[in-house]
Image (cartoon, rainbow, N blue to C red):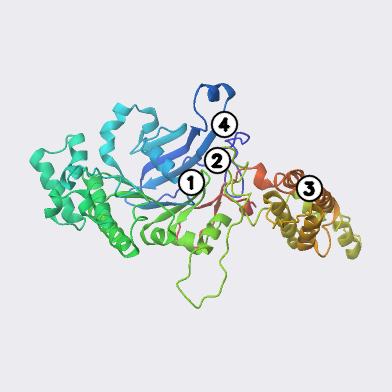
Amino acid sequence: MSSDTDPTEFGTIGEATAAPDWVGGEDGDPLVEVDGLTKYFPSETGFIASIRGAPDVQAVDDVSFEIREGETLALVGESGCGKSTLARAVLQLQRPTSGSVRFKGQDLTEMSDRQIRPLRQDMQMIFQDPQSSLNPRMKVGRIIEEPMKAHDLHDKEGRRERAKELLDKVGLDRAHYNRYPHEFSGGQRQRVNLARALSTDPDLIMCDEPVSALDVSIQAQVLNTMRELQEEFDVTYLVISHDLSVVRYIADRVAVMYLGHIVELAEKEELFENPQHPYTQALLEAIPVPDPSATKARATLEGDVPSPINPPSGCRFRTRCPKLIRPGRFDGDREGLDEDLDEDVREAMLDDYEMSEETWRDTLGFARAVKRRSFVLEEDYDAERTARLLEDRFFGEGFPPGESGDVVQEACRLLAEDEWEEAGDLLERTFEESSICALERPYYEVEAEHGDDVHVAACHLHKE
């Protein structure tokens, strides 16, 4: 959570008060309960950095959810949003900065490495790259036996037989026991990783992009194998992926992550058919349509992901959100006007300080274009002419009314004087930083249209 946000301000339906102990429904027992998990990294290291107090990289910030026994929970989001860091923090491969992780009722964050060690046989991980996660100097049989040996499971002959049995289970041949990793294809190597993860008969397997490095046909084979083994071994998966087609195939529930926060969590069909967060909607809009005759343009998100060193306050997606809520003072207050006034007079008075939705979108687009300098600089660049071009593009039919129009005109004056940074800061302060999206971190439970599970959406559009 950002430093200026009160961690107690999350809440119940229709309110922005504190996140629950975990996000999830009541069906099934929770195998893993994550509450307020935070992981920061120093942005700089060394003695000088410690003296001047360099800010931290907020990789994961105040994340809460649960993983139920026997389910597949998928974690999706853009690269760099903190998915892998979250998975490693849950497994305590990287100790979290704060928060708790309860595995089968035991708080791992309060346990030492020695105390956690016996539990590690119940928690395994499949890494993204099947090549680099296998020791090239070890034969496949020995690779699969290593976890069993580390946890003192079975005798030597028992481990050998277990390794051969698992090779058979994941679709490989027992004769592959004495082969080296380089003798296998990418899909076969990932099957070896799966066999190694299953060797200790774990309850939970973290799968970090398990099929992203594979061809599509091989992806299907590996995913089918994972589903079959889940039923046979009664294992629980946390699958990290940015491929929504993979997620839709294998997941039971989906958590969408953006810049260290979970912004939406729901059952798979509910999330795909009824997305409630603008970021989730943008991700789904970006999925290619397998129809060469389709002409519908796909929506794209503008702007860059903010730095996790200094993330936006409130909703972290607000700097790119196409549905940012306009500040309250630009909404107009019809209840505050005399009801006996003529309707035309009322409308004229409202025009002094109220923006229509269309005008707000134009104003927000103008502010973001200035902030990002998303315009073409010609060789004979002229600040005043460029300012007029932007003005005509967004406000060709006139400036917004009242205070908002005054701010826009002042920004145009600054642009004409080549003061882009000052203009951008003025627009951001007026139109973005005073929005509820910047002032409060959202958390809402919305009504699900598919299934009975809880649907969480961290977006103020759902504020009653």
Asked if 106 appears above or below 265 in the picture, the reply is above
- Real-space CA distance between mark 1 and mark 4, rounded to the nearest whole angstrom: 18 Å
What residue sits 48% from the left and 52% below the top?
A: 77
Question: Closer to the N terminus: mark 4 or mark 3?
Answer: 4
Q: Is residue 309 visible?
A: yes
Q: Amino acid at mark 1?
A: Gly
Q: Residues within 10 Å of mark 4 (few under 14, many from 20)?
A: some
Along the horizontal axis of the image, is 452 left or right of 326?
A: left
Question: Closer to the N terminus: mark 1 or mark 3?
Answer: 1
Question: Closer to the N terminus: mark 2 or mark 4?
Answer: 4
Contact, CB < 8 Å: mark 2 with mark 1? yes
SS for tag 2? loop
User: In front: mark 1 or mark 3?
Assistant: 3
Q: Residues within 10 Å of mark 1 (few under 14, many from 20)?
A: some
- Real-space CA distance between mark 1 and mark 3, rounded to the nearest whole angstrom: 34 Å
Task: Identify the residue position indicated by label 1 in the image.
Answer: 80
- Residue 257 position within the rendered picture, expressed as x and y whole percent measured from the top left: 49, 49
SS for tag 1? loop
Question: Closer to the N terminus: mark 1 or mark 4?
Answer: 4
Task: Identify the residue position indicated by label 2 in the image.
Answer: 308
Question: Closer to the N terminus: mark 2 or mark 3?
Answer: 2
Asked if 280 appears above or below 93 in the picture, the reply is below
- Real-space CA distance between mark 2 and mark 1, rounded to the nearest whole angstrom: 9 Å
Task: Identify the residue position indicated by label 3 in the image.
Answer: 418
Q: Amino acid at mark 2?
A: Pro
Contact, CB < 8 Å: mark 2 with mark 3? no
Residue 365, image quadrant: bottom right
- Residue 115 position within the rendered picture, expressed as x and y whole percent measured from the top left: 30, 28
Asked if 299 appears above or below 197 in the picture, the reply is below
SS for tag 3? loop
- Residue 345 position within the rendered picture, expressed as x and y whole percent measured from the top left: 91, 61
Q: Amino acid at mark 4?
A: Pro
